[in-house]
Amino acid sequence: MNQQPVRRGRGRRPAAEVRTGVLEAAADLLFAEGMKAVTFERVAAAAGSSKMTLYKWWPSAGALAAEAYFARSRPVLAFPDTGDIRADLTTQLTAFVRLLTEGGAGPVIAGLIGTAQTDPDLAAAFRRDYSGPRRDLAVEALDRAQQRGQLRADLDVALLVDQLWGACYHRLLVLDAPLDEAFAVALVNNALDGAAT
């Protein structure tokens, strides 16, 4: 991908505008070319910013990539609250699977997870900016359902979150079975209906 540096007029841009531009540029590179493309040099050139600004805001290019992925995926992964936990889980989990399989995020998230194994800054950013907040939203939704009497009072909702999303990550990373919307629907139904006779 030949990306031309962004040319800016004179004058200092507000920090929020610069940060948004950097995250958009990083996300574009990440989705187009993968983790290897997200370097401070390339992102700064694409965003029309300085490398020093990026070094000031992010401890590593991996941490920048994680935040860029989160900023790009956040609008797609809003967690609904209709009062029907089966419908809400199905909507959220199928949106997640669509993002991974149709939205181009599958290779991106796999690259982030892989790189996080050796980049502690990326691992911390991933937990802080993505997996932690996403997990909290799911736990809160299940807690509300529990309070409404839609789930057993003794259910470990955090464990249920791990079962649902963990199964999707397993299929994404291990590649031994398809990851599709039918799988997401089946996961929700299996979790809520249980396996016992």
Image (spheres, grey):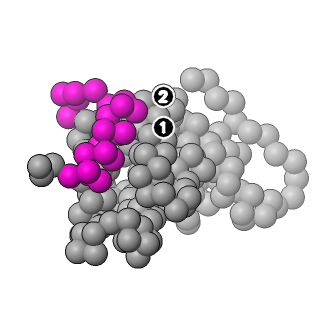
Q: Is residue 166 left or right of residue 150?
A: left
Q: Position of residue 36 (x, y in %)?
A: 41, 36
Q: Main secondary structure of the magenta part?
A: helix
Rounded to the nearest angstrom, the CA distance separating label 2 from label 1 is 6 Å
In which image quadrant can residue 111 be found?
A: top left
Question: Helix, strand or loop at disc 2?
Answer: loop
**Figure check: 76 above or below 54:** above
Question: Does residue 165 appear anywhere in the picture?
Answer: yes
Residue plotted at (72% across, 65% down)? 15
Q: Which residues are magenta?
A: 172-194
The residue wearing badge 1 is 99
Q: Are marks 2 and 1 in contact (CB under 8 Å)?
A: yes
Residue plotted at (55% across, 66% down)? 56
Question: Does residue 132 appear anywhere in the picture?
Answer: no
Residue 144 included in the magenta stretch of the image = no
The residue wearing badge 2 is 102
Identity, as a three-letter code, of the amino acid under mark 2? Glu
Q: Position of residue 165 (x, y in %)?
A: 32, 50
Identity, as a three-letter code, of the amino acid under mark 1? Leu
